[in-house]
Image (cartoon, rainbow, N blue to C red):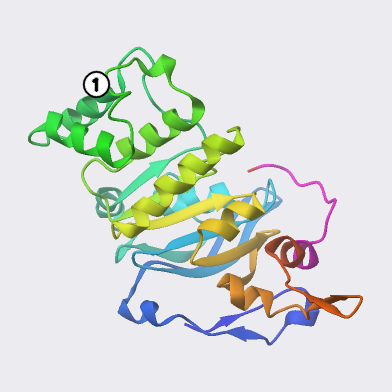
Amino acid sequence: MTLTLRQPSMLIGMTIPATTSELQGPAIRVRGLAKSYQKLHVLRGVDFEVARGSIFALLGSNGAGKTTVVKILSTLLKADAGTAHVNGFDVATRAADVRESISLTGQFAAVDEILTGRENLVLVARLRHLKAPGAIADELLKRFALTEAGARRVATYSGGMRRRLDIAMSLIGNPPVVFLDEPTTGLDPQARLEVWHAVNELAQGGTTVLLTTQYLDEAENLADRIAILHEGRIIVDGTLDELRRILPPAEVEYVEKQRNLEDIFLTLVGAGTDKEQH
C-alpha cells in the first residue's frame, strides 16, 4: 500500500511506503468511507489499512469522526459510501462474520460493579457458550495482572483496573481484531500506563488493535502506525518515524531538535478549532 498525504497543500504528492508486514494481507481495509448526517459531513472519503497483529492509532480531535469509523467497522452504523473489510469480510454484506471476528471496547468500561472481576469474566464466557469458563477467567485475570483482585467486587477497583478487566472481557473467544475507542478517557496517569501495558499485551499475543485516541502521547507510545483524521479525511498515515520526516528538523541555537507527534499533529490540523463531537 502506498499512502498519499492529502492535506494541507504543502503535503500533496508526498508518499509514505507501506511496511513489509502488510504484504501478508491487512486485517482491516477501508476505501472511500463516507458518512453524513443531513448537511454535516462526518467522513469524506476515508482510506487506510491495518496490518495483522499490529496496533493502529486513529488520531484526531473531538469531532474528527473517529468513533463514526469504529461504529461502521463494527457494523453498528452503515456508511453512505465506500467499502470496509474486517478480517476479510465486507462489513456491509458479511456483518455476522465481522461481528464474530471482532470485539469492541467503548469509551467507558462495561463491567458489572456488583460482581467480582472473576464473575464478570465467567459470565461473558458462559454467554458465549464456551467450555471451562472458570479456566478462561483465571487465565485472563493472570494475563492482565488481576489475579489478586479477581475475588473482589468490581466496585472496589481503580479506574485502570476496571479498564483492564473490560479489555480482558473483550478477549473472551479470542477475536482476531479488537477496537478500542478512546480507552483511556478520564483515567489518571497511572491508570493510563496500566491500560497501555494491556494494549501492548494484546498485540504481542497476535491480536490486531485499532485504537482511537485524541491523546498524542498515547498514539506515540503505542502505535506501530498512526493515521491522523481531520475534518473527515485521513491527512497522513505512517509510522512515527515516517511522520517525523514530514517536517524539517527544528533548530534552537544550532542544535537539532527531534520533531515529536505533537509538532506533526498541530502543523497538519492546526490548533484552536472547535469541532462538533461525533
Q: Position of residue 6 (x, y in %)?
A: 68, 76
Residue in the foreground of this view, choosing between 175 and 259: 259
Left or right of residue 64, residue 274 in this image: right
Type of secondary structure dominating the magenta stretch: loop
Quarter holding the C terminus is top right
Q: Position of residue 167 (x, y in %)?
A: 37, 39
Q: Which residue is mark 1?
A: 119
Going 31% across and 78% down the picture, which residue do you hit?
A: 24
Left or right of residue 128, residue 7 in this image: right
Residue 102 higher or lower than 247, as above or below: above
Going 36% across and 19% down the picture, which residue do you hit?
A: 112
Residue pushed farthest right?
253
- Can the viewer see residue 236 in this picture? yes
Residue in the foreground of this view, choosing between 138 and 16: 138
Left or right of residue 159, residue 269 in this image: right
Find the magenta span and give its range: 266-277
Residue in the foreground of this view, choosing between 145 and 56: 145
Whether the magenta-drawn stretch holds residue 276 is answered as yes
Q: Quadrant of residue 209?
A: bottom left
